[in-house]
Image (cartoon, grey):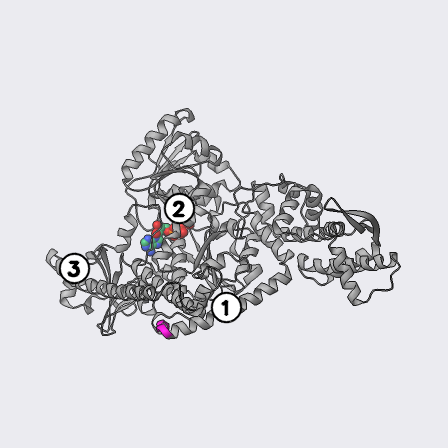
Amino acid sequence: MAPRESSSTLAEALRAEQRHVSMVYDRLDAARERAASALSAEHRRGGPGGTHQARLERDISAAEHARRFAQLTSLERGLCFGRVDDTGGETYYIGRTGLRDAHNELVLIDWRAPAARPFYTATPSDPGPLVRRRHLHTRGRTVVGLDDEVFDLTRLSEPDRRGLVGEAALMAALRRGRTGRMGDVVATIQAEQDQVIRSGLAGALVVQGGPGTGKTVAALHRAAYLLYTHRDTLARRGVLVIGPNAVFLRYIGQVLPSLGETDVVLTTVGEMFPGVRATAADTPEAAVVKGDTRMADVVAAATRDRQRVPGGDLEVLIDVRTSVRDGVEVAVERMALRIDHATCVRARDRARAVRSPHNVARKLFVDTALTALAHDEARRLDMPPLDAEDLRHARAALWSQPPVRQALDALWPELTPARLVGDLLSDPALLYPAARAGGLREEEATALLRPPGSPWTAGDVPLLDEAAELLGEDDVTGRASARDAARDRREAERYAAEVLTITGVGETELVEAAELADRTAGDGGERTTADRAAADRRWAYGHVIVDEAQELSAMAWRMVMRRVPARSLTVVGDIAQTGSAAGARSWGEMLDPYVKGRWRETRLLVNYRTPAQIMAVATGVLRAVAPTQEPPVSVRDGDTPPRALRVPAADLPTMLPALVAEELTEIGDGRLAVLTPDARHLEIAALLPGAAATLTPDALDSPSAVLTVTQAKGLEFDSVIIIAPEEILTQSPKGGQDLYVALTRPTRRLTVVHHAPLPDLLTGEHFTD
Ligand SMILES: Nc1ncnc2c1ncn2[C@@H]1O[C@H](COP(=O)(O)OP(=O)(O)OP(=O)(O)O)[C@@H](O)[C@H]1O
């Protein structure tokens, strides 16, 4: 531990750092002013007039300056947070962005740049080139404190040695009260996390770590790092971050903008199919079946089952003569056309044989059937054999007749994914045969059955995605719009390249013409990569990050892998926390089918969230439910031992509000959560009318919230009150995992309220009453 300095040397050290920090802020102000004046110059040039090209140039350029200005503005807080002194006698400052002084000397190094790396990786046993690492604490633009770690005291100058300052920056960061939003940790990234963050872009990286080991925080910093380091690839393709629910996304949402990244899409599995929002929950039985890859075969069988032939010949009544009566066209003569059964079978088999998606192959089926009908019509009308021209007209005329369309639609309907999957899950006549063909047992199929028109669940979304692959898009309109898009894009790139040359933005801002074109293509003028990617089911992302990845089912992985054909992934999770019945039992089980032998695993072992006394209780549960999993080691002790209070259920209405009030007083501005068994969520929420009780993002802004364990996954609170752990334990086959998750949410205080004797695995010795 570094010796504590006298107050005068600290004051001197603070003054010296203040001089540098003030200079760095001056440079930031200067950069902002440049961006602001460029923006207003652009606006002055503006107005609706000019050619299309001139307007486009202005829009692109103004958007760029606005983006730059917004980015520089977001850097205000904690701009410069670190300093390193190396063995060569050089000193560098580390911050949220890179800045140069008027002589082009680097006065601040971006935390993501290679030169900043020693700041994060130096340890006492392996300091690399560092003699000292210093953390600078600022409030506004004022330096208010310093933390030093000295790796080689002998190499420090005498004044520097006297100026050494103590307490670890990490501990100070961890002790802070929670705000309901995750913050960035650029100043205190630990060496093991830095390895995750800067691991190469290619292949799949699995980050396995217990609760509170900083998996989420490391994954988000990795997104920012990858976008900085592989800007060319990733700014155009974007990065997708998949989290467990909307509240979690809101919880982590502000970390990335504070890291200066905008080309990132945050989503949940339930939102990955454009136009569908999963609002309902599956039963555990249905979730397990829907998550199984046999469902891919079930959906494929359901699609084939919609490609039918009639039991015998197909007969269609068409109008051969119509007349107009009272302004309405009516049939005055009808004729029956026929296609024999064997021809129907041939038409279906031919369409299937091309192996195109259902809606694409449908055209071939319809064409073949119309040709047969046209020949039959000619025969019945004693017409000579049809030549190619006659045939085309005859087919078109037949297709315009509603009875023909209805008959062919019934045999090979045009289907949307929503219709295919919606019908399949609600019509026993469709479900049971497809389920059998896909290898499901009868009771598994029964678990899927639900009323028609039921709302979508997150488990339906991978099925919809599977269906979309099998059904395909309408090829003709698809090709036409692809042609239009390619033409628009060529235009946009040309304009963008010209604009870059004119404005000179190219060299200074590292913005490529293609990237600018990306932002300007499409209907929105300034749509970002993220906007366009989020709206496009077939978008191929440059990198995908999956958080709480243990919860994804095998079917969900199939869908995720379609979004990342390059298989560049970061998979973050904890097998010991798997709560979903369809979730992962091992990483290999989920990833081997796609990246066998090409995924690497890193383990994070230090818990930065939960104090040691609370973690001791959680470890008892982990040992019982997942004995092979290693519990993480807490980096700090807490001030308050965990409590267990035995309370008769009848006393809860009076006892709980008082307990919550008492805890809120203890934690001041911090956040509190009451975690309940699923079945008692409503009952307990009713006892606490002041607490947020639904899983809306606003729940994070409330000082107290009543949540189920699933809802609290990934989140953390200064104080946690767990109600009836004995009921959480038995509420599902994964009840033990749920209890482990609940016990590892607090950052400071834990209270367990139980009605029955404490379950054995919550060993009472860790608790005070
Ligand atoms: N290097 C660090 N510096 C400061 N705080 C950190 C650091 N690493 C992690 N933390 C803090 O520790 C807490 C836990 O981190 P995080 O939520 O990323 O963990 P996790 O592994 O995703 O946990 P879980 O599996 O329980 O969801 C957060 O408050 C985070 O800010």
Label 1: which secondary element: helix
Label 2: which secondary element: loop
Relative to 277, say whether 232 is above or below. below
Picture quadrant where residue 613 is located: top left
Mark 1 highlights which residue?
Answer: 489
Alpha-carbon span between mark 3 and mark 1? 53 Å
Q: Is residue 362 left or right of residue 765?
A: right
- Say what amino acid the circle numbered 2 marks: Leu
Picture quadrant where residue 241 is located: bottom left
Image quarter hosting the C terminus: top left
Earlier along the polypeptide chain: callout 3 or callout 1? 3
Q: Nearer the viewer, residue 626 or 658?
A: 658
Mark 3 highlights which residue?
Answer: 14
Specify few, some or many for label 1: CA neighbours under 10 Å numbering under 14, 14-19, or 20 or more: some
Relative to 178, say whether 652 is above or below. above
Earlier along the polypeptide chain: callout 2 or callout 1? 1
Specify few, some or many for label 3: CA neighbours under 10 Å numbering under 14, 14-19, or 20 or more: some
Q: Nearer the viewer, residue 206 or 763?
A: 206
Alpha-carbon span between mark 2 and mark 3? 36 Å
The residue lying at 41 percent from left, 69 percent from top is: 54
Q: Nearer the viewer, residue 367 or 121?
A: 367
The residue lying at 62 percent from left, 45 percent from top is: 422
- Say what amino acid the circle numbered 3 marks: Leu
Q: Position of residue 491 (x, y in %)?
A: 49, 70
How many numbered badges does the structure rendering display?
3
Label 3: which secondary element: helix
Residue extending farthest front: 326
Q: Which residues are magenta?
A: 502-506
- Say what amino acid the circle numbered 1 marks: Arg
Mark 2 highlights which residue?
Answer: 715
